[in-house]
Amino acid sequence: MESIDLVHAVDVLLYLKIAFNAPHFPHEPITGHHAQRFFIHFLAGILSQFSQMDLFLVYRGLGLLFVLICFIFSNLILEKLKVALNVRALLLILLLTNPYTIRFSLLVPGMLQDLLFFTSSLVLFYGLLAGRVSIVLVSCLFAALGRQTAIMLVPGTIIWILYGSAWTPLPWRKLFATLVAILTFGTFIGTIELSKGFSLPTLDAEHLIAIFYWFKSSDRGITTLLDFAFRLAVPWFSYLAIALTFFKRKVNFSPELGASILIALGIF
């Protein structure tokens, strides 16, 4: 609980209501977008109940499992891209020590839905790169169970499946791209329906357009927005510096590159 207070991660208190009530849903309603992310907290609560382990210990165990999966699939991705060993090691170290991706989730284990989403997105990237149908489907499912923002991964995923070199031999790739979209959006809608019994009205649509109302009501407007944008961009600077230093060859634009940028923006 000290780490929750330290970083003001008050959202955890809502997720804990889900975990502590498992295998039942909470009786007290919580905000819609938090309730929609119930999966990993419901699972942690069930594991804690049946194993008689402390809930936060279960959270940390699942968090470490996700970190291990992140490390394994990041390494597989870099191997697939034929990145030199020294550069690969540096990138993996940066990933594991980045305060914006993994360390925060380990410091505040009750925010595990974010780590589930990030891990699933990495696995999705590998599945697309390797042309693995089952990996793409499973990762899209779990990404959507982690966060609603998984729907933002769909455009890049579809472009990769339709035009990526690993997928062109697949004669039914258009059908598969449609299936990926249906699975992701279906999971999104399914989590809304399943959480209706313990959630307040969802504000997902309002969140998408909230910036327009914020501009209208905020005195600082563009200045504050630029400040927030700079803070969000900081984690990317180190990777950009490495790319400019180590990757000397000319980068040719490809469908995979365009799709990966879209997916990265979806995660972002």
Image (cartoon, rainbow, N blue to C red):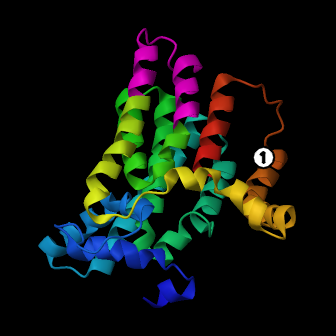
Q: Residues within 10 Å of mark 1 (few under 14, many from 20)?
A: few
Q: Residue at x 65, y 45 (%)?
A: 265
Chief SS of the magenta region: helix
170 inside magenta stretch = yes
Q: Which residues are magenta?
A: 154-180
In this rendering, would 5 be left or right of 133? right
Which residue is disc 1 drawn over?
243
Q: State whether residue 198 is above or below residue 122.
A: below
Q: State whether residue 226 is above or below residue 250.
A: below
Q: How many marks?
A: 1
Q: Give coordinates of residue 182: x percent, y percent.
A: 39, 30
Q: State whether residue 94 is above or below residue 192.
A: below
- Determine the image quadrant of residue 38: bottom left
Give the amino acid type for the residue marked by disc 1 in the picture.
Ala
Closer to us: 177 or 211: 211
Q: Give coordinates of residue 225: x percent, y percent.
A: 79, 62
222 inside magenta stretch = no
Closer to us: 48 or 16: 16
The quadrant in which the N terminus is found is: bottom left
Q: State whether residue 222 is above or below residue 130.
A: below
Q: Give coordinates of residue 144: x percent, y percent.
A: 41, 47
Q: Residue at x 53, y 47 (%)?
A: 75
Q: Secondary structure at mark 1?
A: helix
In this rendering, would 84 be left or right of 252? left
